[in-house]
Structures are given as C-alpha cells and as structure tokens.
Image (cartoon, rainbow, N blue to C red):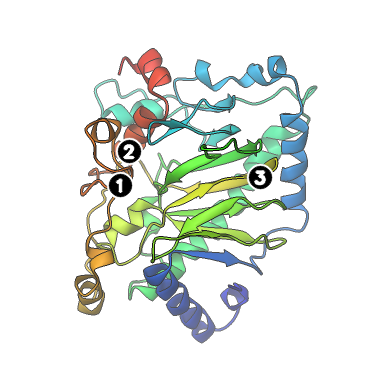
C-alpha cells in the first residue's frame, strides 16, 4: 500500500484513510511503501545491527537487559518468552527515554519508566544518536498512520494525539534471528500490545501472519518498506472493529529486522471509542470479530486458556505492559520486582 496520498489533497488523505481502515477491519496487515522516511536511515540502522550482533557476548553484556529493572538493553537468544515458549532471537530493546518514576505509591506499571542502556562510542560509534533518530522518525510516521485510522473511523484526525503525554512508552526492537530450529519459532505467535507497529523486515523472509481463514501466510520482502500491523489497544478501543492480527517468525536462514511499537502514556484507558453505529453493526455481524481474543496472561495460559484466547483485556496500557513483562520475562520480573 502506497502512502503517497498522505502528501496529497484532503480528498487523497480521506481515500487513503478509508482504504487503510477497511484493510485493518478485514485482514489486519499491509506492506507500506512511499513512507517518506529520510534516505539512508534504513540502511544505517541495519548496518548498526550488523555491527552490534557480530560483537562477542562479553561486549554485548555492557548493556545486558537482565541488569535493568526497566527491561532495556540486549538479551541473548531464548531470553524472551511468548506464550510460555522461548523465542529464538537476540535483540536490543530501546523504550521511550524517562527518568525513573518518583511515585512510590503509584500503579506497578510506573516502575517501567526509566533510562535506556547504550553501547560506548568506542565500541559501537553513534548507536545512541542513530537509535533516537530512528525512534523520532518512526514515531512521526506512526502518528500519521494513527491520524488516518482516526479519519477512517469517522473521528477527528487528531483524536488519538492526547493519549501521548509525558509518560508515553513506545519501543524499538533491533532483532537478530538465527535460523529457526525445527518445532520452534524466532518469535512465537502473538498479538502486539500498543497502537500500531512498523516493522522493517530486512532482506530475508520469515515473517508470517494468520489470515482470516486460519492459514499462516508468508509476508513478502519488499525493499524500502514497512510492514504495518495494529496492536490490541486499537482492537479494544474500537470494540474489535480493527483487528490485531496474530503473527510469528520462522526463519530458514539468519535474519535481522527492526520493529517500532507506538505506545501511548501508561495510564491511557482501553475504553471503547464512541463509534458510528455502522462500525458497531459490522462487528455484530461477524463471528470472527465478535469472538476475537487478546493475549492471555501467564496465569491464564497456565490454566489452559489459549495463547490469544483471553476474552478480556486490561484497563490501561500500563497494565498491558506490566502483564507483557510478567509473561515474557518471569525471571527478570521476579528479580527486579518480586513478582
């Protein structure tokens, strides 16, 4: 899908908004081209990842995620769990930069606010500057995408903007996948958490999405593109009109990718938006939409609920993230937060 109409007339933007919203009601994934990001940025990010992931582990451990109560930094293959199964990938996680929260009596999720870890310039020159530039550029593109969804849902273009306040929590993952062993996955099947995800897939296939018929479909590799999918926030807020589509990675050869997850302020509620009746009726008429679930908590999965079979979601984005870390990093959560 071309984003060229973003830079066109009001009518062009509206037609693009309607088309995009229809795609994410019916299918839930698209490959975006003509996104307008600065030339050379994608190449620079993949060059940085290539340099980092060839470093010896003792140097990577200078930003070891296990030392961070804010879950930021590098982790080795098999550290993160999705649906109680290890993901066969290593990665650097960079979240929105914050000072640690001073609200001792606030919600648990405020403990996730904190600083990132950066490689020294004498080992990986310019990593921090490049990562923050990437963060800024992808955030602006994600804002444009959210504006299109708002228009397509019959809302004001800036409807979602107030959700991004002082404690907004977006994430970039710089990911390195070895070839996936038989019976495993680079990342196991899951839905994303926040508003929207923009994924630079690199040159190697491996990403698969679950189509409406229940079949896994290989996502094509398109040069200079981003795969767009939405998270459970938009699914919850639109009463399942927009669908967070399950996806996974199974790579037959080594693969790198860079993902950006656009997240709002931690206290943002997942309350339904007051949409026009036609959107409500469309959900009521579709069993697939009515029955769409959410990522199960670790406790629900242990109790036998399917991986993406939870009928409920949390009240706020911060609670969603807290559940994500509890489910994906149980040892680190216990180490740093006693849970």
Q: In the image, residue 300 lies at what x, y percent?
A: 24, 35
Q: Quadrant of the C terminus?
A: top left
Which of 287 and 46 lies nearest the eye of the viewer?
A: 287
- Left or right, residue 80 beside residue 333: right
Labels 1 & 2 near each other (Cβ < 8 A)? yes
Asked where in the image residue 332 lies, by quadrant, the reply is top left
Q: Secondary structure at mark 3?
A: loop
Q: Nearest to the eye among marks 2 and 3: give it.
A: 3
Give the numbered dot on residue 108. Answer: none
Task: Give the residue at mark 1.
Answer: 268
Which residue does the numbered mark 3 point to in the structure image? 252
Asked whether, in this view, residue 40 is left or right of residue 72, the answer is right
Cα distance between the residues tagged 1 and 3 = 39 Å
Query: Observer-nearest residue: 85 or 41?
Result: 85
Number of callouts in the render? Answer: 3
Q: Distance from label 2 to label 3 (Cα)? A: 35 Å
Residue at the (59%, 24%) spot, across then down? 76
The residues bearing labels 1 and 2 have C-alpha atoms spaced at a distance of 7 Å
Q: Secondary structure at mark 2?
A: helix
Q: Residue at x 53, y 27 (%)?
A: 78
User: Which residue in the structure is indicated by mark 2?
Assistant: 318
Crowdedness of circle 3 by 10 Å Cα count: few (<14), some, many (20+)?
A: some
Looking at marks 1 and 3 on the same chain, the residue that comes earlier in the sequence is marked by 3
């Amino acid at each position: 899908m071309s984003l060229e109409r973003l830079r066109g007339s009001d009518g062009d933007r509206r037609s693009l908004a309607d088309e995009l919203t229809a795609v994410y009601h019916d299918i839930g994934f698209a490959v975006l081209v003509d996104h307008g990001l600065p030339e050379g940025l994608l190449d620079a990010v993949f060059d940085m990842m290539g340099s980092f992931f060839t470093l010896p582990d003792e140097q990577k451990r200078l930003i070891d995620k296990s030392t961070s109560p804010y879950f930021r930094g590098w982790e080795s293959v098999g550290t993160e769990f999705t649906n109680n199964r290890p993901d066969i990938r290593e990665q650097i996680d960079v979240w929105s930069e914050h000072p640690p929260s001073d609200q001792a009596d606030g919600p648990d999720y405020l403990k996730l606010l904190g600083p990132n870890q950066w490689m020294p310039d004498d080992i990986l020159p310019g990593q921090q500057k490049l990562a923050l530039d990437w963060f800024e550029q992808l955030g602006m593109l994600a804002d444009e995408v959210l504006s299109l969804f708002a228009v397509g849902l019959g809302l004001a273009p800036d409807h979602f903007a107030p959700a991004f306040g002082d404690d907004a929590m977006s994430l970039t993952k710089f990911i390195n996948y070895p070839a996936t062993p038989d019976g495993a996955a680079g990342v196991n099947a899951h839905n994303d958490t926040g508003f929207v995800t923009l994924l630079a897939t690199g040159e190697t296939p491996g990403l698969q999405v679950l189509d409406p018929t229940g079949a896994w479909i290989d996502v094509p590799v398109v040069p200079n593109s981003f795969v767009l999918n939405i998270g459970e926030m938009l699914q919850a807020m639109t009463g399942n009109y927009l669908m967070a589509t399950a996806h996974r990675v199974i790579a037959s050869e080594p693969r790198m990718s860079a993902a950006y997850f656009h997240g709002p302020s931690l206290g943002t509620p997942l309350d339904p938006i007051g949409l026009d009746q036609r959107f409500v009726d469309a959900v009521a008429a579709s069993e697939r939409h009515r029955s769409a679930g959410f990522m199960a908590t670790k406790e629900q999965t242990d109790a036998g609920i399917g991986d993406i079979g939870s009928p409920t979601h949390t009240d706020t984005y911060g609670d969603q993230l807290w559940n994500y870390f509890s489910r994906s990093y149980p040892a680190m959560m216990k180490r740093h937060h006693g849970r």
